[in-house]
Amino acid sequence: MTTTKHLPRPVTDRWEWQLHAACVGLGSEVFFHPSGERGAQRSARAERAKAVCRSCPVIRECREHALAAREPYGVWGGLTEEERADVLGDQQQPIAS
Ligand code: SF4
């Protein structure tokens, strides 16, 4: 009998959490700042995104993904790119334009 134990798991197993995300249907502008946005406007955008994340049932999975993939931009799992860099102990700040 053929065994499939050695084969990689189906890709959907790794991404299915996204189907349950609170951000489904929201525009990317909620989570990704435009080039050059700084200061209070940028902070307010990040706080609005984090509020969505706080209500998200898959925040843990999203955060784990973002940290593992070193997502360079945007709010993922309730963390901004700068906060993820801090968690990862990155010496360099992300390229935030
Ligand atoms: S934690 Fe935030 S960015 Fe991640 S899936 Fe949920 S709402 Fe979207």
Image (cartoon, grey):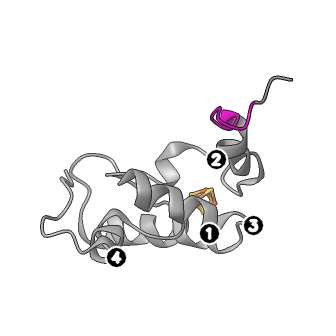
Q: Residues within 10 Å of mark 2 (few under 14, many from 20)?
A: few
Query: What residue did someone put label 2 on?
Result: 26
In this rendering, is residue 14 above or below 42? above
Q: Residue at x 71, y 36 (%)?
A: 12
Amino acid at dot 2? Leu
Return the mark for residue 3.
none
Using residue 3 as the reference point, say whether residue 74 is left or right of it: left
Give how far apart the Cα atoms at labels 2 and 1 are.
19 Å
Q: Position of residue 35 (x, y in %)?
A: 25, 46
Tell me the residue at 57%/43% (across/down). 27
The reply, left or right, for residue 57 in relation to residue 42 is: right
SS of the residue at dot 2? loop
Q: Amino acid at mark 4?
A: Val
Q: Which residue is mark 4?
A: 87
Q: Are marks 4 and 2 in contact (CB under 8 Å)?
A: no
Q: Label 4 vs label 2: CA separation?
A: 26 Å
The x and y percentages for residue 95 are: 18, 53
Quarter that holds the N terminus: top right
* Residue 2 lies in the magenta-colored region: no
Question: Distance between the Cα atoms at labels 1 and 3?
Answer: 8 Å
Of the image marks 3 and 2, the number of the one nearer the N terminus = 2
Residue 52 vs residue 12, the one in the foreground: 12
Residue 8 falls inside the magenta stretch:
yes
Q: Residue 52, percent across and down? A: 63, 66
In front: label 3 or label 4: 4
Q: Which residue is label 3 attached to?
A: 57
Residue corresponding to mark 1: 60
Which mark lies nearer to you, 2 or 1? Answer: 1
